[in-house]
Amino acid sequence: MNDPITRRKSLITLGGVVGSVLAGGALRAASAGGATASGPAAVANGAVKCVLTPELTEGPYYIAGEHVRRNITDGYPGTALALHLTVLDASSCKPIKGAAVDVWHADAAGAYSGLNGSSTTFMRGIQRTNANGLAVFHTVYPGWYTGRAVHIHVKVHVGGSVVHTGQLFFNDSLTDRVYKASPYNKRGARNTRNAQDSIYRNGGKKSLLSVHKHGSGYVGAIAMGVSRS
């Protein structure tokens, strides 16, 4: 997994598709008439379009060789968050099976694992996408730290190459609600919202997770289109 960072552009779907990953990992978008279309047929008829978006910085906390696992919490507290991340071939919007999706983020207290020689691994992991291009992680809603909006780092590997390096963001109003509960409410108010985050301002709006309530936690989803060459 120690692949070099590439300068390839990643692609995501717009027009009501960003963040929408429904059952089976299929894409859906609303057409002008209110009907829905999905998959390659939607690309062909123009209901779904794949467009280039800038890569977002890897940041200083990436560690190669993370564990292949679905639950990445290591028992750390926080509001449950299931991540449903779908990887698509940007040339066709078809799902890519077997892509390695690598995620890492801060815990509820705003700390990263594995730093300064630490052997901790919380909030880090890798999953392979299934036949629908879907990788699922069980984690907790990230905490904040000074100077950054709330986010999750992601890296996608296909065929031994890094094809996307990005960051996933949350709606500020949702974060406000989540942070009213323990353990988030034991800290002071966060000092950086999306609008003040330099990385969010340079493309993060296109990487907002689509989040819905599920039991006592949440499910966050996004579809990421990548170029395989």
Image: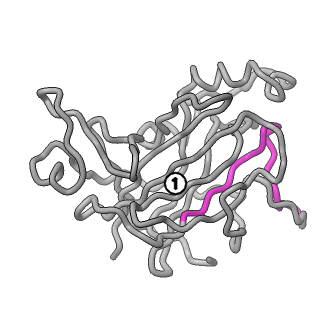
Q: How many residues crowd around disc 1 within 10 Å: few (fewer than 14), some, or many (20 or more)?
A: many
Up the image or down, 148 lies above or below 95; here it is above
Up the image or down, 63 lies above or below 138; here it is below
Going by the numbered disc 1, the residue's amino acid type is Gly
Tell whether 192 sits left or right of 225: right
**Residue at 26%, 52% in the rendered image:** 50
Quadrant the N terminus occupies = bottom right
Viewer-proximal residue, 22 or 116? 22
What is the quadrant of residue 44 in the picture? bottom left
Q: Secondary structure at mark 1?
A: strand
Task: Verify whether residue 11 appears in magenta.
Answer: no
Please name the colour scheme applied to the rendered image.
one colour
| Magenta range | 101-116
User: How far from the left and from the top, in percent, is residue 215?
Assistant: 63, 29
Up the image or down, 183 lies above or below 19; here it is above
User: How far from the left and from the top, in percent, is residue 95?
Assistant: 35, 62
Q: What secondary structure is the stretch in magenta mostly built from?
A: loop
The residue that label 1 is drawn on is 166
Tell whether 108 sits left or right of 40: right
Q: How many marks?
A: 1
**Residue at 44%, 68% in the rendered image:** 163
Viewer-proximal residue, 41 or 174? 41
User: How far from the left and from the top, in percent, is residue 208?
Assistant: 47, 38
Residue projecting furthest to the bottom:
160
User: How far from the left and from the top, in percent, is residue 169?
Assistant: 55, 39
**Residue at 39%, 43% in the rendered image:** 22
Tell whether 166 sits left or right of 20: right
Quadrant the C terminus occupies = bottom left
Up the image or down, 96 lies above or below 84; here it is below
**Residue at 52%, 39% in the rendered image:** 200
